[in-house]
Amino acid sequence: MGKQNDIIQGVNQGLDLALRIVEKDGIEELKKTIEFRNVSGCSLNISRKDIQAATEKMKFHSTMTAIAISIAILQDDFYFSNYQIEKFNELFAEHVNKCCESPMLIKEYCRKAEEAGVFINLDKEN
C-alpha cells in the first residue's frame, strides 16, 4: 500500500504543479514544461522557468568549460589556426543557442554523434 500511496502523492503533486503553471503562465508554458521534462529527464516539483533560472549559471559555466577544452584540443592536437578557432567558437555558440531555444535539437545532435561512432545517452545516469 505504501508504493501506491507514493504514486498517488506523486500524481497529486504533478497536478498541483501543472495547475500552478497554467494559472501563472498559461497552457503554452505547461506544454513547454512537459517538452522540457521529456528531453531533459528533469522531474522536479518546480516549473520549467524555475529550473531554468536555477541552472542558468551552471549551464553557462559548463558551456564555457566545454568551449575552452575544445579550443585547447583543437590548438594542441589538431593544430587549428586562429581563424579556424574563431570560426569554431562562433559556430559552437550558435548551435548552443539553438539548443537552448529548442531542447529537442539535443537528441538530433546525439544522433549525429552516433553516426560518427560517439554514443551519448542523456536518458540514463552513469
Image (cartoon, rainbow, N blue to C red):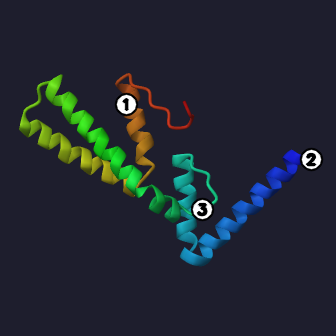
Q: Is residue 22 above or below residue 58?
A: below
Front position in the image: 84 or 9? 9
x and y, in percent, of residue 9 in the image: 79, 57
Q: Which residue is mark 3?
A: 46
**Picture quadrant where residue 74 is located:** top left
Task: Name which residue lies at 38% across and 39% down.
Answer: 109
- Choose the circle earlier in sequence order: 3 or 1: 3
Q: Where residue 1 is drawn, which disc sits there?
A: 2
Q: Where residue 113 is drawn, which disc sits there?
A: 1
Which amino acid is tagged 3? Ile
Q: In which quadrant of the rendered image does the C terminus lie?
A: top right
Q: Residues within 10 Å of mark 3 (few under 14, many from 20)?
A: some
- How far is mark 2 from mark 3, CA to CA? 27 Å
Asked if labels 1 and 3 touch by Cβ distance under 8 angstroms, the answer is no
Which amino acid is tagged 1? Ala
x and y, in percent, of residue 111 in the image: 42, 34
Task: Name which residue lies at 34% across and 52% down.
Answer: 60
